[in-house]
Image (cartoon, coloured by chain):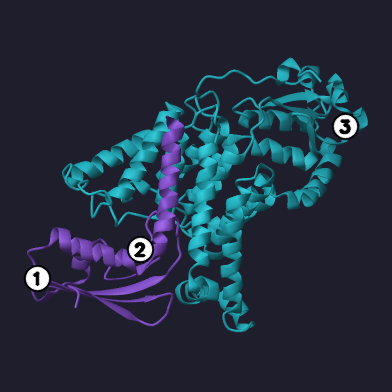
Amino acid sequence: MRLAIGVAFLAFQIAAIVYARYVPSRYFCWAPFDMQTEYWLEVTVDGRPLNGQEIRRRYRRPQHGVDNRSPQHVIDIVQQCEERYAAAERVRVRMRYTVNGKEERQWHWPPR
Amino acid sequence: MALAPALKPVPQAPSWNPFRCGGTALPIPLLLMVKLVALTLLLTNHVRLLPDPFLPFIPGLDLLLPPLVFQRILQTVFVASALALLFNRWVRASSLVLGLTILLAVVSSKAYYGNNKTFCGCLLFLTGLYEPKRGTLLLRWQLIVVYFGAGLNKILDADWRSGLFFENWAANRLRHGLYMQAAALLPPLALAKIMCWSTIIVELTLSPAFAIRRAWPLAIWINILFHSALLLFTGSTFTMFFYAMNASVLAFISWPQNRLLVIYDGDCGFCTRTRRFLERFDLEGTLHWTAYQSGLARRYGLTDDAARERLYLIEEGRIFAGYGAFQRMAMYNPASWISIAILVALPWDDAGIVRRVLVAGFLILFSPLFVPLGESIYSIVARNRHRLSSETACPVDRHGA
């Protein structure tokens, strides 16, 4: 029984490694420290811009930070946070980000 | 050759002493591994990072309990199971519970999610599934999967293949002076490419190496050197990665089944004092000291002249002399590794510098490459040992503890 649980546990990780090849996120696929994502968040709620502290409270991420993972992980947090916890508010998010120091990109919520 | 009765393992009951690992449901190296993880989790105050549910990977986890209650339960179980491990109580169950607590924390919050925490959780959880008949099979495959995933993710990433990742990390993020000076001497991205490809090769080599028993000693050393090099380069432990990845190799270590025979000069006061000093730290009773004058050394092919000149350690038929014998004594003492982990994990003021010095020092002391220099120092001390102590051993000491 213990062996079966352990094998299933390891099989899940191998499946996650394979799955990660087909999606931009890198969860549970053993990709530690694989990217350097620097990002800046600009958020308005019902027309009012949020300051750094309010952004940190809302997303548990700093307004400007460096994540050692895919930018999709920050995008997932912002998007899912708005979808799950703030449906009644009129929220606009602009995230500027660079990956490994390359050209700057932008992501918007709601999508344009 | 029949084993001397004194070399048979000493039966033990679990001790409350956190520096001891014998007499529990887990083999010594395995308990040592999970203890090192639990200890460094506690010393780095990881409990404060345990989250309340926030965008969980498993839907509904954030609806089970009020967030603060969920977080407090995680923290309480985390501390209780980590302390139980440290004090050798219900070690297998404690490892399982601590591992599940960390994994639950990981899947309950995308803000908390991280590879180093997940890896700690995996090690503890799989140790909790330990069965004597299968040994450390699951843990060994965990290492194989981790390195396979890490290497694959990197080799399929264009920024790793081109060196761009390392260039941006070392030059722009870390502003690493030594790297920037060295890189300036080479064509653009050349050094970064070397570093990226070295990492990819190491990771993709370690994955199969941990699957082949004969390659384990090499894989263990590459693993330790790789993670120590990262610490020496950055001064950072990458949260829990340095501790957990180095501790994980204990799943590949074969610990001596019998006591180690230490043969020393019973007529030398300095040697006898050294024996008494080291016996104080031999908490598991791993060492059986005997003076060469007892004649036991001859059973292992050692002449009296040879045994008079150097200290010998006999580990299941293999003979180690001088500095190498002291290395073995330290290596097979869980208290050594627990003390090293405490020293490295303590919240030093200049943590980056202190950790670099400590890790470099320990690497040198335990490295096989240092043995020739260690031997030279040992020889100088051994030649002058009668001058170092006026004490003469009493006849009782000659026959060991």
Quarter occupied by the N terminus of chain B: top right
Q: Residue at x 34, y 69 (%)?
A: A71
Q: Chain of mark 3?
A: B
- In the rendered image, which residue does mark 3 sit on? B308
Q: Chain of mark 1?
A: A
Instruction: Give amino acid for label 2.
Output: Ser
Packing grade of label 3 (10 A; few <14, some 14-19, many >=20) is many
Instruction: Give amino acid for label 3.
Output: Arg
1 and 3 marks in contact (CB < 8 Å):
no
- In the rendered image, which residue does mark 1 sit on? A90
User: Disc 2 vs disc 3: which is toward the camera?
Assistant: 2
Q: Residue at x 42, y 80 (%)?
A: A102
Q: Mark 1 or mark 2: which comes first in sequence?
A: 2
Q: Which chain is purple?
A: A
Q: Secondary structure at mark 1?
A: loop
Q: Quadrant of residue B340?
A: top right
Out of A84 and B54, give the one closest to the viewer.
Answer: A84
Q: Chain B colour?
A: cyan
> Label 1 to label 2, Cα distance in Å?
27 Å
**x, y (%) of residue B152?**
51, 61
1 and 2 marks in contact (CB < 8 Å):
no
Same chain for the residues at labels 1 and 2, yes or no? yes
Q: Quadrant of residue A72?
A: bottom left
Q: Name the mark on residue A25.
A: 2
Packing grade of label 1 (10 A; few <14, some 14-19, many >=20) is few
